[in-house]
Image (cartoon, rainbow, N blue to C red):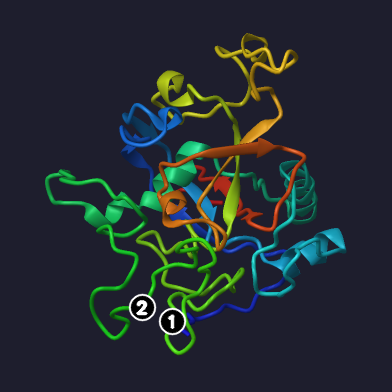
């Protein structure tokens, strides 16, 4: 198997391990690819906390008393949950823990996935952007004891989910445990592979054109109303129930692992390739939570 296992922390099912993500300025979106990710533009985010890994199936079961995931595995991310299901889960966790978890915004997730902190120079110059949550365009490790091994769980092409026997490429045909594969520079595991992740934002194709440059988020159809798209007469798919998801998965080709790509689906829909991780605001000078 190509993937490597990393240290696990045994905690109660209601405890959500988070990583403090130091805020800053970055380029949201991209000038390449589909029109709805253009233009790349500079925004700034406050500090926030983000789940170290996706919510596991055992964590979901502890709160919701069921496991909807098509592929069962306690340490794997829960899937087959809709955006609406996730809101119910988070509400129950918050009521039991006193925390204020939520889904990350599209901007927070993209910022955390790119982890440009790993490219920071002394004078704040960042000479290049990242295509994936690591440096370079290769999907394989290019140095060290893991040289030649795949960095992520994804689909290389039609019918190729894990490579040939004897030298499997990423070692996983379907979802893998949340601590599989190395984390990115913010110490976030599987942030752009294994399963896609639900985000808070309402989907609009022009979000990257009209987003605020300070903590951008699309909570509603303000400035881009649903009636402008005429879904009623089948002239568009756009309405106020479409939510953004990102990340790529075991069932996606490498293109979708790029943090700047974006897709949408109805908030009451679910698939075996979409899970989620929780976020939380960092309060005060030291970002306590």
User: From the viewer's perspective, is 251 left or right of 166?
Assistant: right
Q: 123 or 179, which is in the foreground?
A: 179
Q: Is residue 285 visible?
A: no
Q: What element does badge 1 sit on? A: loop
Note whether 59 is above or below 9 in the view shown.
above
**Residue 63, position in %: x, y?**
81, 60
User: From the viewer's perspective, is 162 left or right of 90?
Assistant: left
**Residue 167, position in %: x, y?**
42, 85
Mark 2 burial class by Cα count in 10 Å: few <14, some 14-19, many 20+: many
At x 51%, y 45%, the residue is 282
Considering every residue shown, the one lying at the far top of the view is 228
Asked if the residue at tag 1 contacts the one at tag 2, i.e. Cβ–Cβ closer than 8 Å, the answer is yes
**Residue 46, position in %: x, y?**
43, 38
At x 58%, y 47%, the residue is 280
**Circle 2 residue:** 149
- Image label count: 2
Mark 1 burial class by Cα count in 10 Å: few <14, some 14-19, many 20+: some
**Circle 1 residue:** 2
At x 57%, y 53%, the residue is 196
Q: What element does badge 2 sit on? A: loop
Considering every residue shown, the one lying at the far front of the view is 158
Query: Which badge, 2 or 1, comes first in the chain's sequence?
Result: 1
Q: 191 or 194, which is in the foreground?
A: 194
């Amino acid at each position: 198997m190509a993937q490597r296992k990393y240290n696990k922390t045994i905690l109660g099912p209601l405890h959500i391990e988070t990583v403090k993500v130091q805020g800053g300025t970055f380029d949201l979106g991209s000038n390449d690819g589909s029109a709805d990710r253009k233009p790349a533009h500079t925004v700034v985010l406050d500090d926030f906390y983000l789940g170290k890994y996706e919510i596991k199936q055992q964590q979901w079961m502890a709160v919701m008393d069921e496991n909807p995931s098509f592929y069962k595995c306690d340490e794997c991310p829960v899937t087959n949950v809709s955006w609406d299901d996730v809101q119910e889960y988070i509400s129950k966790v918050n009521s039991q823990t006193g925390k204020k978890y939520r889904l990350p915004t599209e901007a927070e997730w993209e910022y955390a996935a790119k982890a440009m902190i790993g490219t920071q120079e002394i004078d704040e110059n960042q000479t290049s952007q990242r295509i994936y949550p690591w440096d370079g365009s290769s999907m394989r490790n290019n140095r060290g004891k893991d040289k030649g091994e795949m960095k992520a769980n994804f689909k290389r092409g039609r019918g190729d989910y894990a490579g040939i026997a004897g030298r499997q490429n990423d070692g996983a045909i379907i979802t893998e445990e949340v601590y599989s594969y190395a984390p990115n520079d913010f110490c976030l595991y599987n942030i752009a592979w294994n399963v896609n992740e639900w985000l808070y934002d309402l989907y609009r194709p022009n979000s990257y054109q009209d987003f605020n440059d300070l903590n951008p988020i699309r909570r509603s159809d303000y400035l881009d109303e649903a009636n402008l798209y005429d879904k009623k007469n089948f002239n568009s798919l756009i309405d106020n129930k479409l939510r953004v998801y990102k990340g790529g998965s075991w069932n996606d080709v490498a293109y979708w692992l790029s943090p700047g790509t974006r897709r949408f689906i109805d908030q009451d829909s679910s698939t075996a390739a979409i899970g989620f991780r929780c976020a939380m605001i960092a309060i005060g000078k030291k970002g306590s939570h």
